[in-house]
Image (cartoon, rainbow, N blue to C red):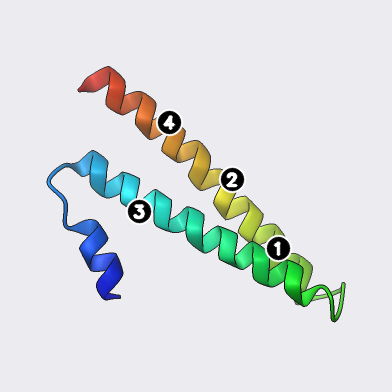
Amino acid sequence: MKFLKSLLRTNSKYEKFENLTIAFIVFGTCLLSVGIGLSIFSPKGLSPTLAMAGAFIAFTSTVVLIFLWTVREVFE
C-alpha cells in the first residue's frame, strides 16, 4: 500500500496516470503468470480465467499507456 501511495505522489497528472498504468501492467503480468502456473495442476476452472484476465489487464494497460504517451507529447 505504501508503494502505491509513493507512486501517486507526483507533480504531474500525466506522471500519476503513467505510474498507475505501469502498476496495472505489473499486476496483470503477475495474474497471467499465476494462471499459467496453476494450469499445470488443472487446465479447467480458475486457472485459465486468471490467465485470460491477466492477459486482458496487461494488454489494456499497455494500450492505455501508449495512448497516454501520445497525448502527453501532443499537449505538453
Point out which mark residue 67 bears.
Answer: 4
Q: First in sequence, mark 3 or 4: give its number.
A: 3
* Left or right of residue 10: residue 49: right
Which image quadrant: the C terminus? top left
Per the model, the C-alpha gap separating discs 3 and 4 is 14 Å
Instruction: Please report the residue visible at 29 percent of the width from the left and 18 percent of the height from the top.
Output: 74
Q: Residue furthest left?
A: 11
- State yes or no: discs 3 and 2 in contact (Cβ < 8 Å): no
Residue 75, located in which quarter of the rendered image?
top left
Q: Residue furthest top?
A: 74
Q: Tell which of 64 and 10 is nearer to you.
A: 10
Per the model, the C-alpha gap separating discs 1 and 4 is 24 Å
Question: How would you rate the neighbour count of disc 1 (Cα within 10 Å): few for under 14, some for 14-19, many for 20 or more?
Answer: many
The picture places residue 35, in percent across and down from the top left corner, at: 71, 69
Q: First in sequence, mark 2 or 1: give its number.
A: 1
Q: First in sequence, mark 3 or 2: give its number.
A: 3
Give the amino acid type for the residue marked by disc 3 in the picture: Leu
Instruction: Please report the residue visible at 59 percent of the width from the left and 45 percent of the height from the top.
Output: 59
* Left or right of residue 72: residue 54: right
Give the amino acid type for the residue marked by disc 4 in the picture: Phe
> Which residue is under mark 1?
51
Give SS at disc 2: helix
Which image quadrant: the N terminus? bottom left
Give SS at disc 4: helix
* Left or right of residue 64: residue 8: left
> Which residue is under mark 2?
59
> Which residue is under mark 3?
20
Residue 40, located in which quarter of the rendered image?
bottom right
Give the amino acid type for the residue marked by disc 1 in the picture: Ala
